[in-house]
Amino acid sequence: MIRIRAAAAAAACALLLAACGSGGGGADASGDGPASVKVSVIPIVDVAPIYLGRQQGFFAEQGLKLELASAQGGAAIVPAVVSGQVDFGFSNYTSLILARSKGLPLKVVAPGAGSTGVKGRDFGGVVVKTGSPVRSAKDLAGKRVAVNTLNNINDTTVRASIRAAGGDAENVRFTELAFPDMLAALDKGNVDAVQVVEPFLTTALKNGGRLVASNYVDTAPDLTVAGYFTSQKTAAAKPELVKRFAAAMRKSLGYAADNPDAVRKVLGTYTKIDPALTSSLTLPTYPAQVNAASLKTLSALAVQDGLIKTAPDVKDLLP
């Protein structure tokens, strides 16, 4: 999952200013041969469709030569897109909402990954260890809960789970931990619960952990959590390039949705997920269209939980 913080936004603003007049990214939709297109992604399950799309030739069909750059998180991807270092990026929607609220000129061009909508069978959730007194999201009030990034999509959606269960969402203590460090912290008792996504969710459950909330499902029944985006500058200057990229992404997402075995297989080409786990993972959904309702839901949560004071106009983010 993908994140941005205030410091990242400030860095993005600086990069944006530096990029003004630079001519943006290196892709060119004109001329002979395929147009090079640079995309920054995170090595997680969510982005499997773009790797499959490249394998299947969907980007080549659109006259695009795809160059994927791996990043650790959205904190690096957002400024890279805004400055024109890359043409497109992948991020969770809350990060894009926070960035847009700070005036960063972003535009979602294609969906990315979404919740399955099934409680207990989603690709993310809140887990406690064996013997914990926490039996439901309501019991998380007053507890220490680890999330990968503070003040972003995972703490707001965990709060949504607590509210849905009738608990006090204000009385919860979030701790920032990287996903790979969470299960050890839970085992040692340094936190009471962890919000994890795949493959850490499956690992936690195999180790005896107990799922107490499906936070994305509790937030909305059909929640899209992430998507592909570009800068408004690129969208205005290279509309044909954006159109072709979006078309290739939609085909890639459709292929991934129809071929879950291919998704599990491609994970071995760009992640370090244990091959023994891939068959057990709960995959996200790969939506066909950008879900404006999800952007509105997450935007409202960001305001409700104090991440931003005023929600940006979601229309500014939509294609």
Image (cartoon, grey):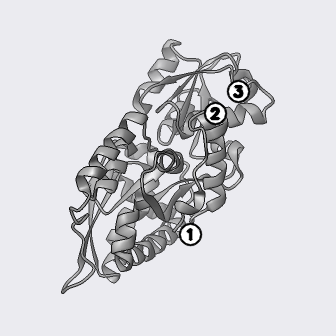
Which residue is at 65% across, 41% downward?
301
Element type at marker 3?
loop
Are there few (<14), some (14-19), or many (20+) residues within 10 Å of tag 2?
A: some
The residue under label 2 is 305
Q: Could one spot residue 121 in this view of the protein?
A: no
First of labels 3, 2 by sequence position: 3
Residue 123 rendering spot, x and y as whole percentages:
56, 46
What amino acid type is highlighted by mark number 3?
Ala
Residue 162 rendering spot, x and y as whole percentages:
72, 31
Which residue is at 26% across, 58% downward?
20
What amino acid type is highlighted by mark number 2?
Asp
What amino acid type is highlighted by mark number 1?
Ala
First of labels 2, 1 by sequence position: 1
Q: Could one spot residue 228 in this view of the protein?
A: yes
In the displayed structure, 253 sits above or below 118; it is below
Q: Are marks 3 and 1 in contact (CB under 8 Å)?
A: no
In the displayed structure, 319 sits above or below 179; it is below
Spatial distance from mark 3 to mark 1, Cα to Cα? Answer: 33 Å
First of labels 3, 1 by sequence position: 3
Q: Are marks 3 and 2 in contact (CB under 8 Å)?
A: yes
On residue 288, the disc is 1
Q: Nearer the viewer, mark 3 or mark 1?
A: 3
Residue 83 as seen in the image, left or right of residue 137: left
Determine the residue located farthest toward the top in the rendered image. Answer: 189
In the displayed structure, 186 sits above or below 295; it is above
Are there few (<14), some (14-19), or many (20+) residues within 10 Å of tag 1?
A: some
Determine the residue located farthest toward the bottom in the rendered image. Answer: 32
- Front-most of 19 and 124? 19
Which residue is at 29% across, 44% downward?
14
Which residue is at 41% across, 55% downward?
90
The residue under label 3 is 169
- Where residue 145 sits, quadrant-wise, is top right
